[in-house]
Image: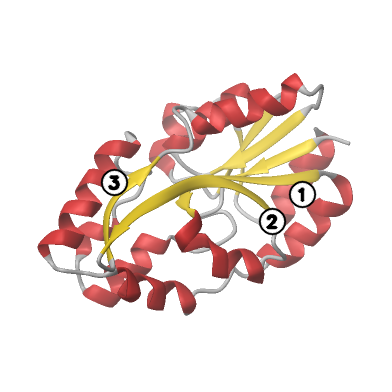
Amino acid sequence: MDILCLDLEGVLIPEIWVGVAERTGIDELRKTTRDIPVYDDLMQLRLGILAQHDIDLDTIDDVIGQLDPLPGATAFLDWARERFQVAIISDTFYEFARPLMVKLGSPLLLCHRLEVKDGRISGYRLRQQDPKRHAVKAFQGLNYRVLAAGDSFNDIPMLEQADQGFFFKAPDNVRAQYPTYAAADSYAELQSLLQEA
């Protein structure tokens, strides 16, 4: 059975940091890897804003608690699990993602960890460098064929390494830089691409 690797935010759940931006009114927190491709640059920006505005982890947890999977995401995952082994490969954090993973039926999640001090996020620890590419490579090393889908610049290493990669609801600026990847704008379209693969 093939393995399907999926990004999380923007593919199965809303962007967590956009939710925090809406709660706090801080527009700068709307930036994602669609806007700032280098993940560490993006996270340093976010950490600086959290410290500057004294936003604690409880506030972020409260936002996350009110988020639900994107419409159709749970049904898509049910469909995918019948045909593939499914792994979520994300640049989010276990501390953020747990409540949403339960709502998605607790799929395998490979992501990062936060460093928390006195109820505030003080830093983060990557699972490893270039984690999305390494995850796909590891599955391939076990003789699995890997399909992958994501929506952003940080998903490109995963799509490049996969036997076949697809964009899902990727913005025009991402698609324009990587025109070789087939793109889906709905779960039905992604299902068709995966079936053809």
Q: Secondary structure at mark 1?
A: helix
* Residue at 21 percent of width and 73 percent of height: 25
Q: What's the image's color scheme?
A: secondary structure
Q: Residue 63's x, y, as percent?
A: 39, 75
Which residue is under mark 3? 43
Q: Quadrant of residue 99?
A: bottom right
Tell me how far mark 3 sits from mark 1, CA to CA.
32 Å
Tell me how far mark 2 sits from mark 1, CA to CA.
6 Å
**Residue 91 visible in rendering:** no
Q: Residue 67's x, y, as percent?
A: 49, 74
Q: Are marks 2 and 1 in contact (CB under 8 Å)?
A: yes
| First in residue order: circle 3 vs circle 1 | 3
Looking at the image, is 197 positioned above or below residue 141? below
Residue found at the very far front of the displayed protein: 118
Q: Quadrant of residue 74?
A: bottom right
Question: Could you classify mark 3 by the number of other residues whose Cα lies within 10 Å: few (under 14), some (14-19), or many (20 or more)?
Answer: some
Q: How many marks?
A: 3
Which residue is under mark 2? 187
The reply, left or right, for residue 18 in relation to residue 127 is: left
Question: In terms of depth relative to the viewer, which is nearer, 74 or 87?
Answer: 87
* Residue at 20 percent of width and 58 percent of height: 28
Which residue is under mark 1? 191
**Residue 13 visible in rendering:** yes
Tell me how far mark 2 sits from mark 3, CA to CA.
29 Å
Q: Residue 150's x, y, as percent?
A: 56, 42
Label 3 amino acid?
Met
* Residue at 15 percent of width and 68 percent of height: 54
The reply, left or right, for residue 55 in relation to residue 113 is: left
Quadrant location, the C terminus: top right
Q: Residue 180's x, y, as percent?
A: 57, 24
